Amino acid sequence: MGEPMVSGVTTVAAGWAVFAAVLLGLLALFAAALDGVATARAERSVAAGGGGRPGGGRRGLAVPLLEAARLLRQCRRVPVASDVLLWRVGVAGLPVLALLMVAVVPLGRWTLFDLPVGVVWFNAMDVAVWAAVWLAGWGPNSAHSLVGGYRFLAYGLAYELPLMFALVAPAVAAKSLRVGDIAAAQDGLWFAVWMPVAFLIYCMGALAFSVWGPFSPALGADVAGGVSAELSGADRLLLLAGRYALLAAGAAFAVPLFLGGGAGPLLPAWAWSLLKTVVLLAVLVLLRRRLPAVRPDRFMEVGWLILLPAALLQDLVIALVAIGRQ
Amino acid sequence: MGVNQLLARYAARRAHVLVVEVPGCWTLRVAAERGVTDRGWQVTGTPADADALLVCGSPGADLIELVDRVWDQLPGPRVRIELEDIANLDEALESAAAQLADIDRHRNDALTRQTSPDPTGGHETDEHRADEGMDHHARHEGMDHHARHEGMDHADTSHAGHAGHAGMHHAGMDHSGQEIMDRGEHSSPDHSAPQAMDRSGHEVMDRSGHQAMSHGSDEGMDHTSHEGMDHSGHGGMEMAPHGIPLAGRGEDRDGLEMDVLHLALGPVLRYWPAGLVLTVALQGDLVVDATVELLEQTRGCDDGDDDLSAATAARLVDHAADVLALSGWADGASRAARVRDLLLDGRSEEAELALRRLHRRVARSWLLRWSLRGAGRLDRQVLDRHDLPAWLEGDAYDRLLAILDGTLLESLQDRDGHGAAQPAGAATAMVRALPRLVSGLDLAEVRLLVASLALDTAAVPAEARHG
């Protein structure tokens, strides 16, 4: 069924999209469970001398399933005069966008969608997250949600340009915007190694478009949950799942772009892709509890005065090397 | 039935609980939160996410009313727990778990209520839905397609005396009290060309920008209240979709005209002093004006004959936990909560060790310092002007360190080393000064500032609560 491409990546039948969705869902579930364990460990009772009550940190493992059961059962609450259509579009947009992101990520040798401009596609999807989060904040007609929406846009203004230029670096080095080509171009040397600045900025961007960790004030406790303040039941479940899915998609895309794709000894290519994704995802998940939030107004300065010039310099260096090699 | 039962069983193992602290019931609230997390449940900060509403202490009349309105906002299945004594905690949570798993009970509850909470204050019984006005979810239409129209001050004009909407102006709960009013410059409707109104005088507007008026009654409007308004330029209708007036506008700090929303912070708000209600006027997320109110002190809770010194220390660390949680550092907040729990359990040596470790981490974290630096800065002149204690000098980060390094605790202790509650004078001065202190800050800074004051609202004497 597949036709071989220049990059050695095979496009699989469209039906495999279901498999991709399931895989993304499993990765999101893994992320949620890991966060559940980390949280249960940190919040364990002092009474039991550190070990916690029966179950301890292990209890966190079941959290995503219990939460899902809880939210599936919970009624949907609709605030008065809310913009229900836009609200739901925004909330449901997150998991959909995550799925569209992974559509261009090859799993080892197979890909769903071997776009010649895969990098641009990914970038377009992550920009669309702006709209989704903003609509989710706007829709419920609540000041806290709205403030959450503002905050996300403020981050967006600061992280998006550095992220775009970070995505440019691997593309320049591989002389292609096709994700499979970029993975193939890292012969022996991962792009993460010789363009570390771009890799770090990319990871920060992935945290930011997932509204995760230091970039979570859009869902902050100080505004009663911000964008999520009025969400209940299935709507909340979609938003939370979408957030984990975006984080997983961000980690998955980093693999062909910076971490050598499916390359690796012994294991088959798909296993390496998956393994690298899981490891990076775990790191991103565990960062959440460890880092304080970066306030949006503070981050604006960093984004424009440090990250953007750093990303541009990285691009310049990469471009010079690429020219020199010819 | 099988699936429902199964979902219910799993769901009851992971209930999210909205905790309300009655002023003076700090010990009870902390015990309740511990009980909740120990069960593997979670404390939540918004009614939309809550399965259970846990009221710690016996609330006064004003708080009861607010709690009732928060209760209306729980999506359901929902359980309400009134906890007055620590001794009943386990039992109360156990019965809440059983009730949550009881399917029939929630089916009946769900059938008798609306999907949107009732704004009018008549709980659960009100049947009309079309023209609900509510304080919870005021619309901010003025920001986009309705930018040319100004809202009006609801309280003074249109709905005065309108029984159905009397509930609109209760200073609200955390995110429930978002009354949107115009501050001052009401533009007026063109009275010479009255628009059709529906029976109740509330036109529901659609989203495409059609105008509606929200005058109170058919039999003549209160024209006197519109005196002196400008009739120029604006289409000038009071826009009130669903009976909610639109945002009014005012000049922002750059001299541009911008919407003003009114939002009540507290008293049902996590990481917030009990019983404190700060009503802020917001432009974007910037506070331009504020008024403060303290809920009536009820008889509070009997905190027993605990070691006052340890209780004071625990309370201070709890404020540090609030600051850390608001700063977004989840691990830091958990650590502070552990120190608090150790202190409350009388394990002072372990607590001291853990506190010292936490202090070191906070002092070393450049990211936390960078993020909190400058937040809620108070300088000497401001402190002097408002008679505030000297230790508040600096920003939220300085105050966080002062709380954690023990200097604050020492300053509260008397000569024998016995802890004391916060001096009434200092607490009163803080509450009085709040509106001035928060003006010009953004919402995040306001929350950090208030948490870092380590304000004990119960210390404010009754006679200082009004005025």
Image (cartoon, rainbow, N blue to C red):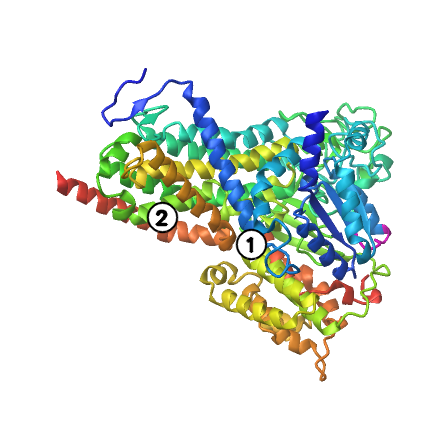
Q: Which residue is labeled 2 in the image?
A: A200
Q: Position of residue B50 (x, y in %)?
A: 70, 42
At x 37% / y 43%, what residue is drawn?
A: A202
Crowd tier of the residue under label 1, counting other residues whose Cα lies within 10 Å: few below 14, some 14–19, many 20 or above: many
Residue type beneath disc 2 = Leu
Q: Position of residue A254 (x, y in %)?
A: 36, 39
Image height of A116 relative to A293, above or below: above
- Between B236 and B165, the residue placed more toward the observer is B165
Q: Is residue B111 left or right of residue A117?
A: right
Res. A175 image quadrant: top left
Q: Position of residue B245 (x, y in %)?
A: 72, 36
- Between B255 and A102, the residue placed more toward the observer is A102
- Between B163 and A242, the residue placed more toward the observer is A242
Q: Are marks 2 and 1 on the same chain?
A: no
SS for dot 1: helix
Q: Which residue is labeled 1 in the image?
A: B330
At x 30% / y 31%, what residue is drawn?
A: A179
Q: Does residue B131 show up?
A: yes
Residue type beneath disc 1 = Ala
Q: Which mark is residue B418?
A: none
* Part of the protein shown in magenta: B56-61
Q: Position of residue A24 (x, y in %)?
A: 46, 32
User: Residue pushed farthest bottom?
Assistant: B415
| A123 is within the stretch colored magenta | no
Q: Are marks 2 and 1 in contact (CB under 8 Å)?
A: no
Image height of B328 relative to B421, above or below: above
* Quadrant of the rendering where the N terminus of chain B is positioned: top right
